[in-house]
Image (tube, helix red, strand yellow):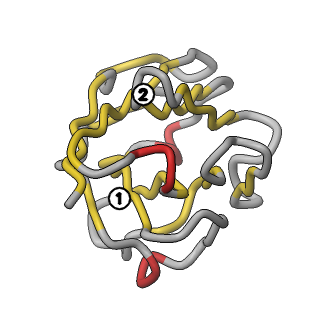
């Protein structure tokens, strides 16, 4: 079992930056690929970014490529999402997720554990 606790959400103006953190506890974090997803009101939860167990492989949704960066620190059991050049379209609840495999995936159905989801609001 893996428990995930996110932090770092909030309100930011368009063009600004935020960094989300996701602290993991429970079974060995370093064996899990990690991902970030988001869900805007009235929309389905969508993939944002993923990182492999050692951080050697990353994968991004086209909508965030070049603006967002996912990283992890296995010594701290934490994964991060650095979000730059934010737009109002990035407004959503952001969820951290872990899967019981080492390789990345962009499918929400392939993730086994989820955090509670902090709100990110980008004002125009």
Secondary structure beneath dot 1 equals: loop
Residue 45: quarter of image: bottom left
Q: Is residue 48 above or below residue 76?
A: below
43 sits to left or right of 60: left
Q: Position of residue 25 (x, y in %)?
A: 23, 39
Residue 33: quarter of image: bottom right
User: Which mark sits nearer the N-terminus, 2 or 1?
Assistant: 2
Q: Which quarter shows the N terminus?
A: bottom left
Q: Is residue 99 above or below residue 66?
A: below
Q: Residue at x 17, y 49 (%)?
A: 116
Residue most extreme to the bottom: 109
Residue 98: quarter of image: bottom left
Q: Residue at x 82, y 38 (%)?
A: 66
73 sits to left or right of 85: left
| Residue hosting label 1 | 40
41 sits to left or right of 57: left
| Residue hosting label 2 | 20
Secondary structure beneath dot 2 equals: strand
């Amino acid at each position: 079992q893996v428990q995930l606790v996110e932090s770092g959400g909030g309100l930011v103006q368009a063009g600004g930056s935020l960094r989300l953190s996701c602290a993991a506890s429970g079974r060995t974090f370093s064996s899990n690929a990690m991902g970030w997803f988001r869900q805007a009101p009235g929309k389905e939860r969508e993939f944002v970014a993923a990182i492999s167990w050692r951080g050697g492989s990353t994968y991004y949704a086209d909508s965030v490529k070049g603006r967002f960066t996912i990283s992890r620190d296995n010594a701290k059991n934490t994964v991060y999402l650095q979000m730059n050049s934010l737009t109002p379209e990035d407004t959503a609840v952001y969820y951290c997720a872990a899967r019981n495999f080492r390789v990345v995936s962009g499918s929400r159905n392939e993730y086994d554990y989820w955090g509670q989801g902090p709100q990110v609001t980008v004002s125009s």
